[in-house]
Amino acid sequence: MKKLVLVVDDSEIVLNKATEALVGRGYEVVTAVSASAADRYIYGDVRPDVIILDVMMPYLDGDQKARMLKAERSTRDIPVL
């Protein structure tokens, strides 16, 4: 079974390039344009095996979101880059 990677970035160009690179290496990829939009995957039925977060995003940046994820019991074991 393919590993699911969630890529979170406010740039469509970055999302497209990351998706292309990861799919080409055999991963399944889902994307979100903000940290809050990523919640539908993080807390959904099919959770990602790893999350790649952009550091600089409006409203809630990647560092803040990573700290939130690591503080929660249900998400602390998901690797975050």
Image: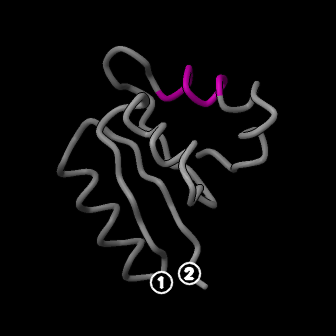
Residue type at mark 1: give it.
Gly
Q: Indicate whether residue 4 is drawn in magenta.
A: no
SS type, badge 2: loop
Outermost residue toward the front in this view = 45
Which range of residues does the magenta coloring cover? 62-68
Q: Are marks 1 and 2 in contact (CB under 8 Å)?
A: yes
Q: Nearer the viewer, mark 1 or mark 2?
A: 2
Asked where in the image residue 60 lies, by quadrant, the reply is top left
Q: Identify the residue shown where x is 33% and y is 40%.
A: 9
Taking the magenta stretch, the answer to whether it contains residue 66 is yes
| Residue at the (18%, 51%) spot, across then down | 13
Residue on which disc 2 sits: 2
Is 76 rendered above or below residue 55? below
Q: CA distance from mark 1 to mark 2?
A: 7 Å
Q: Which type of secondary structure does the marked residue at label 1 adopt?
A: loop
- Residue 69 pos. (x, y %): 66, 31
Which of the 4 quarters of the picture holds residue 43? top right
Q: Badge 1 is on which residue? A: 26
Q: How many marks?
A: 2
User: Which residue type carries mark 2?
Assistant: Lys
The circle on residue 63 is none
